[in-house]
Amino acid sequence: MKKNEVKKLGITIKNNWRIALVVTIMLAISGYILASYGMTKHYITYSDMYVESTDNIPSAEKAQTIALLFTSPKMYDAINENLVTKFSYAELEKMISVTPTNGTQIIKATFDCETSSDSYKLAEIYLGQVQLVLDEYEANAKIQIISTPVEPQRPAFPDERVFAVIGASIGLLISVLGIIVIWKLDNTITSADNITEQYGVPVIGELMDFDNEIDYLGR
């Protein structure tokens, strides 16, 4: 990059850095507001259960079967009996996820709701019904809760801080691109060498910038 181009870039940055800063801050604030007020919150409560088989079926295989029973209509009917607000099978299917850990006797359950209290309450009701449902299906298994549910303090998604950082990053990128575009489109003559390079015209004389000279000399 030639000296006069570097000088022009410096002038462009000097003239536009405040706008770039405002754009970056505004987009960071926008990201935070979007996450706080414009998106559905997801509060997730977790719980792990240990499956102990009472028949001859290996416990890991039993855990896979029980994971399917835990998302059955009987399970959701048992949950609805203890809820003030009733949910459809499809709604509970979105809110509850039960998955066996591969090759182990552990089943992981997650409860995804729009409020932390609902998520925690749903987990408690669910875990209170699991053994009853297994007995109804005659599943020949016992469940031990190895990870009790804890009410979430923050939503798992969206995270306001992450969205603020994303907004700031986008703002910074837009600012940098904007400065580069302004710099490239700027055809201002900044030096005698600039005239020679652009137009091939020799410079006979050059006037001194007295303001800069006075500042430089401190007079």
Image: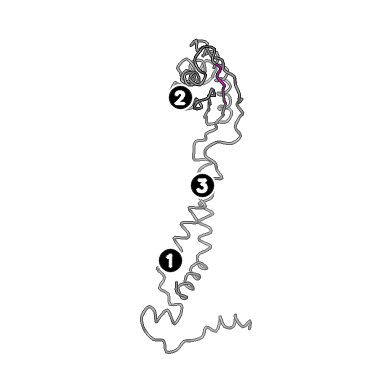
**Residue 143 has which mark?**
none
SS under mark 2: helix
Does residue 148 lie above or below 131 as drawn? below
* Residue 39, x across and y down, in percent: 49, 39
Q: What's the magenta region?
A: 48-52
Does residue 202 lie above or below 116 as drawn? below
**Quadrant location, the N terminus:** bottom left
Q: Amino acid at mark 3?
A: Gly
Label 3 or label 2, whichever comes before in sequence order = 3
Q: For this rendering, which residue is in front, 48 or 12? A: 48
**Residue 31 has which mark?**
3
Q: Residue at x 56, y 28 (%)?
A: 46
| Main secondary-structure element of the magenta-colored stretch | strand
**Residue 182 has which mark?**
1
Q: Amino acid at mark 1?
A: Ile
* Residue 73, x across and y down, in percent: 45, 17
Residue 2 visible (yes or no): yes
**How does the figure colour the protein chain or chains?**
one colour
Real-space CA distance between mark 3 and mark 1, rounded to the nearest whole angstrom? 26 Å
Circles 3 and 1, Cβ within 8 Å, touching? The answer is no
Circle 3 residues within 10 Å: few <14, some 14–19, many ≥20: many
**Quadrant location, the C terminus:** bottom right
Label 3 or label 1, whichever comes before in sequence order = 3
In magenta segment, residue 36: no
Q: Residue at x 45, y 73 (%)?
A: 5
Instruction: Tell me the residue that label 2 is attached to.
Output: 93
* Residue 151, x across and y down, in percent: 61, 29
Which-is-in-front pick, marks 3 and 2? 2
Does residue 148 lie above or below 81 as drawn? below
Real-space CA distance between mark 3 and mark 2, rounded to the nearest whole angstrom? 30 Å
Circles 2 and 1, Cβ within 8 Å, touching? The answer is no
SS under mark 1: helix
